[in-house]
Image (cartoon, helix red, strand yellow):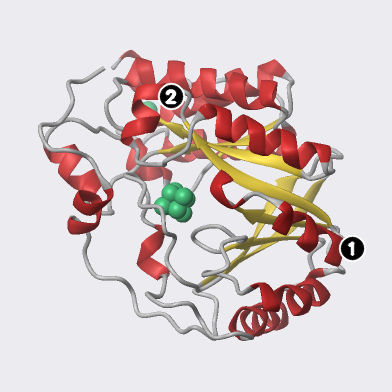
Amino acid sequence: MNDLPEFEIAGGWIKACRGQKNIVDPQKPYALLVEKERTASGVVEDVGIIFLTNKECPYHCLMCDLWKNTTDQTVPEEAIPNQIEWALNHLPAVKHLKLYNSGSFFDKNAIPEKDYQRIASLVSSFKTVIVESHPGFINEGCLRFRDMIKSDLQIAIGLETVNIEVLKKLNKRMTLEDFAASVNFLLENDIFTRAFILLRPPFLSESEGVFWAERSLDFAFNSGVECCVIIPVRAGNGAMDKLFETGIFSPPDLRSLEKVLEYGIEQQAGRVFADTWDLKLFSKCDKCLEDRTNRLIAMNLSQQFISRIKCTCDTL
Ligand code: SF4
Ligand SMILES: [Zn+2]
C-alpha cells in the first residue's frame, strides 16, 4: 500500500479540488437509459434507469463525481415526481426501474418525504424498484416507502472496500459494521441489498486492488447482500486527478476487472456484475478491448465463466 499523501484527505480538500458543476434542470432528470440485467430469477430483462436531479449528497467521498449533476439547494416539492413522470413518458416499457439520485434516496434534503406518495404511485407498476442510499439514511423511512409501493424494493449501498484504512481515507464516514447493520436491517424487513464495490481505489497496487475487491465481495455476500457491482475506479472529479498526478492513484487494468468478475461468479453467492461503462479508460490494448468488453457483458448477463480472451497484451 502506498504511503499516505502529505495532505489530510478530508471533505474540505476534496471539495476544493473540484471544477464546475454541470447546469441541471430541477424539473428534469439529468440522464435516462435502459440496460439489460440478469434478474434475481435468472432471466435477462430491460431495466430503466432514471438519474434524478437533486441536492448534492452531504457526504463528500474521495472518489465520487456524482456532485457534478446536482443542485446546491433542495429541489422544490413535486420536482422529483415531475422528473419521474417525464422520464416514464420517454422510456420504453420496462419491468424494472432504478431511481438513482447521485446520493441517498432517503436523504430528505434530496427527496422531500412529502413526495414519496406521488413517487410511489408512479413506480408501483414496476416489478422491481432499486434506489441507492448511504447507511446513514437507512432507517424506518425506508420501510414507509416500501409500504407505499407494490414493487419489490432493492437498495444499493456503496460498500466500496473492506480495506479499513482505505475505507477511512475515502471519507465515506461509514464503518463495515454500519454497512452490515444496514443490510441486516433491510433483510429483516424484506428489502434486498446490492453493494457497489470499488476495484483499485487509491493507495492500492494493482494486485492489492484485486485482492481487496475479492475480499469485499466475500464480505458483502456474508453480510446478506443479494447482488454486487464491481466498479473500476477512475479519475475525473478533481481530487482523484490530484492523487493520480502524485502516483497515489492509478486506474485498474481491464484484465483485473475480468479477474474479479470471474472470482465473484465462481463463488455462486449471488449475482455479480462488472460495471462496463467506458472501459477504454482501463485498457492499454486496442486489439482486445472490444472482445474483453463483450466478454464482461456476456458474463454479466449469463453469470457464467466464459473463456478468456487471448491477446499479445497478456504477457505485458
Ligand atoms: S455517499 Fe455516495 S453519492 Fe455520496 S459522496 Fe459518497 S459515493 Fe458520492
Ligand atoms: Zn490485448
Residue 164 appears at what percent x and percent y? Answer: 41, 23
Going by the image, does 230 lie left or right of 240? right
Crowd tier of the residue under label 1, counting other residues whose Cα lies within 10 Å: few below 14, some 14–19, many 20 or above: some
* Residue 247 in view (yes/no): yes
Quadrant of the rendered image holding ligand 2? top left
Location of residue 113 (image quadrant)? bottom right
Q: Nearer the viewer, mark 2 or mark 1?
A: 1
What residue is rendered at 22% in x and 40% in y?
Answer: 9
**Mark 2 or mark 1: whose residue is earlier in sequence:** 1
Residue 294 appears at what percent x and percent y? Answer: 56, 39
Q: Amino acid at mark 1?
A: Lys
Residue 29 appears at what percent x and percent y? Answer: 54, 76
SS under mark 2: helix
Going by the image, does 158 lie left or right of 243? right
In the rendered structure, find residue 250 and report the number of the disc placed on it: none
SS under mark 1: loop
In the rendered structure, find residue 150 and report the number of the disc placed on it: 1
Quadrant showing the N terminus: top left
**Residue 85 higher or lower than 302, as above or below:** below
Q: Which residue is mark 2?
A: 256
What residue is rendered at 72% in x and 72% in y?
Answer: 116
- Residues 175 and 80: in front is 175
Crowd tier of the residue under label 2, counting other residues whose Cα lies within 10 Å: few below 14, some 14–19, many 20 or above: many
Tell me the CA gap for discs 2 and 1.
39 Å
Would you say the beta carbon of the disc 2 residue lies within 8 angstroms of ligand 2? no
Quadrant showing the C terminus: top left
Residue 243 appears at what percent x and percent y? Answer: 19, 39
- Residues 182 and 263: in front is 182
